[in-house]
Image (spheres, rainbow, N blue to C red):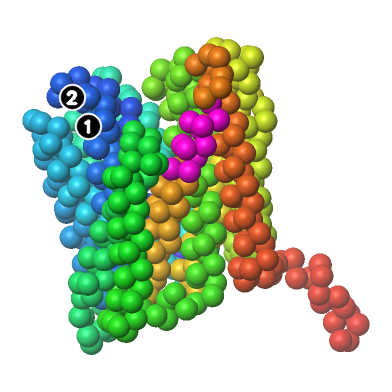
Amino acid sequence: MISSGTRLALIAMGIAVFVIANDFSAINVAIPQIEEDFKTDVSTAQWVVNAYALTFGVLIVTGGRLADMFGRRRIFFIGSAMFAFFSVLGGAAQTEAELIAMRVLMGIGGALMWPAILGMTYAELPEEKAGLAGGIILGAAGIGNAAGPLIGGTLTDVLSWRWIFFLNLPVSLFAIFVTWKEIHQPRPEVEDRTIDYAGIVTISVGLVSLLVAFDQVTDWGWGDPRIIGLVVLSAVLLATFAGVERRAGEHALVPPDVMRDRDFSLACTAVLLMSAVFFASLLYLPQLMIKVLDYSAIEAGAGMLPMLATFAVVSFVAGHLYERFGSKPLLMLGSGCMAVGPALIALLVSYDAGVSDANYWAIVPGMTILGLGVGLFYPTVTTVGVTAVAEARRSLAGAIIYMFQIAGGSVGLGLTTAIFIEAGKGADTPDATFIDGLHAAFAVDAGIAAGGFLIATFLIGGGVHLAPRFHRLYAGPSPRGHGP
C-alpha cells in the first residue's frame, strides 16, 4: 500500500515532469507572435525552441551523473531553481538574443531536473512497483506534451506568450516545496566525487555538433561544407569520448558497468530507432493539418490529441500492465504499434481529399495506434533499462536513455526530412508535394520502427508473468489433489 506522503511526493514528481515536457511543446505555437514582437524572422525565432531542446538533450547525461554523485534531491532543487528563475527572466526578455540565452539556461535546469526526478521516483517505490514509476513519469510527460500546444495557444491569444514562461514559476515552486517536505531519501555513499570534465566536454560538443547539423540540414542541404564539417566533428568527438571514458574508468561520466549491461544497451538501441518515428510524427502531422487541411495552430494542436492523449493515458496504465504481465508483451505490442501507426498514415492520407475533414479522419487511426505504441513502449523500455543497472546508477541510466531518445529523434528527423523533400519534388501542387513526401518519409519511418520491434521482441530480456490472482487458473492441482 502506498502511503499518502508517497502519493504526494509522486504527484510532485509528475508535476515537475509536466512542466519540463510542456515547455518543449507550448512555445511552438507562440513562435509567430515572438517573431512579430521582436521583428525577427522564423529562422531566428526557431532557436527559442532549439536552444532549449539542444541544451537539455546534451547535458542530461551530465545531470544524471551529478544526481547519482551528489544526491538527487539536491540536484533537483538546483535544477528547479534555475528552471524557474530563468523562466521568469525569459518571460521578461526584451530581445530575441536575450530570450534565446534564457532558454539555454532553462535547458541546463531541465537537464538537472529530469534524471533526478526519475531516480527519486524509482527509489520512492518498491522494486516490484518499478513499472508504476515509469508509467507516472512518462505519463506526466505525455500529458505535458499533449497540453503544451493548447496551454501555449490559449496563453498567447488571451494574455501573451510571456505567460508561458511566467507560469513555470508557481508550478516549479509547488514541486520544490512538496519534494522538500515529502522526499527524504538517503544521500548516496560516494567516496570519490571526481567529475569527468573531459567526458562532459567531448560528449557535449560532439552531440551539439550532430544535433545542430540535423537541425540545419533543411536550410543548408546535405552537401553543404558546414553540415559535413559538423558531422565529421561530431564523429571525431564521439569516438574520442569512448577513449576518454575507458581511461577514466570508474570516474567516467558513463561508467563501464552501465554500458556493459546487455539489456540496458539494447533498450537504448531500441529507443534510438523508435524515436525517429515519434519525433517525425510530432513535426509533420501538425504541418499536414496546417498546410494541407488549413487548420490554425491551436486547431492543429487539438488535432494531435488522438495521438498525444492516447500516449498520456496509456502511459499511466502501462505501469499496472507491467506489474501484471511483465515487460516483454508490452515491449512487443508497443513497438509493433509504433511500426503500424506511421504505415497506416502513409497508406490512408491522400491529396485527393484536399482541404476536408476526410483527410483528417483518415489519419486518426494511425495517430491513435501510434499513441498507443508510444504509451506502452517508452515507460516499459525506460523501466527495463533503468532497473537493469545498480540502484546507485539509476538517475544516470534514465538520463542516457533520454539522451538516446533525443539523439535518435534528431537523426531520424534529419533522415525523414531529406526523404520528405526528395520524394515531393515531382508533384504538381503544394498539397501533392507535401503528401508525396509524407508517404515516402513515413514508410521509411515504419521500416525503422520495425527494426526496433525486432530488438524488443527477440533481444531485450524479460519474460511474461501473471498477477497472483491468475495463478490459481494455471497452477494445476495441488499435490494432495484438492485443488490449489
Q: Is residue 368 shown left or right of residue 72?
A: right
The amino acid pointed to by label 1 is Thr
Per the model, the C-alpha gap separating discs 2 and 1 is 7 Å
Q: Is residue 94 above or below residue 276?
A: above
In the rendered structure, does residue 209 fall within the stretch colored magenta? no
Regarding residue 101, the answer to whether it shows in the image is yes
Rendered image: mark on residue 120 = none
The amino acid pointed to by label 2 is Thr
Q: Residues within 10 Å of mark 2 (few under 14, many from 20)?
A: some
Q: Is residue 219 above or below residue 207?
A: above
Q: Is residue 427 above or below residue 200?
A: above
- List the residue tagged with mark 1: 44
The C terminus is located in which quarter?
A: bottom right
Q: Is residue 471 above or below residue 453?
A: below
Residue 192: x %, y % from top left: 22, 85
Q: 72 or 200: which is nearer to us?
A: 200
- List the residue tagged with mark 2: 40
Residue 240: x %, y % from top left: 31, 70
Kindly state the secondary structure of the residue where label 2 is placed.
Answer: loop
Asked if the residue at tag 1 contacts the one at tag 2, i.e. Cβ–Cβ closer than 8 Å, the answer is yes
Q: Residues within 10 Å of mark 1 (few under 14, many from 20)?
A: some
Q: Which residues are magenta?
A: 414-424
